Image (spheres, rainbow, N blue to C red):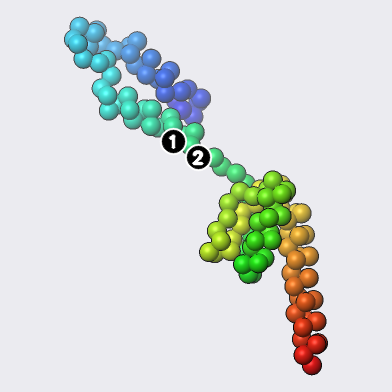
């Protein structure tokens, strides 16, 4: 029923309307409380999870993680990140500019390292 777009309140109303006539004579609820609660919980769970197609990016350092996170946040592309694992999930439709930014970032860092190595020699 939930997959067809029927909500918990509609299911509960249907069950109450079609309850056995003997249930209507007592002072008890037409639907047991635990059944009603479970139907409501299932409905909430269904709308709690949101699927999003993402691009996963593994950063090489904390500085890169911070720079990429700032960039994708400004781009409104940030979906999720783990600072401890240096992993960022980006909205898939915004992956291309993110990958271009990371390439530029890594090229800039590599040039700095080369320049530092040339100075030492």
Instruction: Tell me if label 2 and label 1 are in contact, CB under 8 Å.
Output: yes
Quarter placement of the N terminus: top left
Residue marked by disc 1: 45
Quarter placement of the C terminus: bottom right
Q: Position of residue 4 (x, y in %)?
A: 50, 25
SS at circle 1: helix
Q: CA distance from mark 2 to mark 1?
A: 7 Å
Please say if 14 is above or below 100.
Answer: above
Residue marked by disc 2: 49
Answer with the quarter of the image where residue 32 lies.
top left
Please say if 13 is above or below 96.
Answer: above
**Residue under the image location 61 percent in, 54 percent down:** 89
- Callout 1 environment at 10 Å: few (<14), some (14 to 19), or many (20+)? few
**Residue under the image location 63 percent in, 69 percent down:** 61
**Residue 23 visible, this orientation:** yes
**Residue 92 visible, this orientation:** no
Along the viewing direction, whichever of 10 and 118 lies nearer the viewer: 118
SS at circle 2: loop
């Amino acid at each position: 029923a939930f997959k067809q777009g029927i909500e918990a309140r509609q299911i509960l109303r249907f069950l109450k309307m079609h309850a056995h006539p003997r249930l209507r004579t007592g002072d008890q609820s037409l639907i047991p409380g635990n059944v009603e609660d479970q139907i409501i919980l299932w409905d909430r769970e269904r709308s709690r999870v949101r699927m999003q197609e993402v691009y996963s990016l593994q950063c090489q350092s904390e500085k890169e993680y911070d720079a990429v996170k700032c960039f994708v946040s400004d781009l409104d592309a940030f979906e999720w990140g783990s600072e401890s694992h240096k992993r960022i999930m980006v909205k898939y439709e915004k992956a291309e500019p993110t990958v271009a930014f990371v390439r530029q970032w890594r090229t800039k860092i590599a040039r700095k390292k080369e320049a530092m190595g040339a100075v030492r020699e």
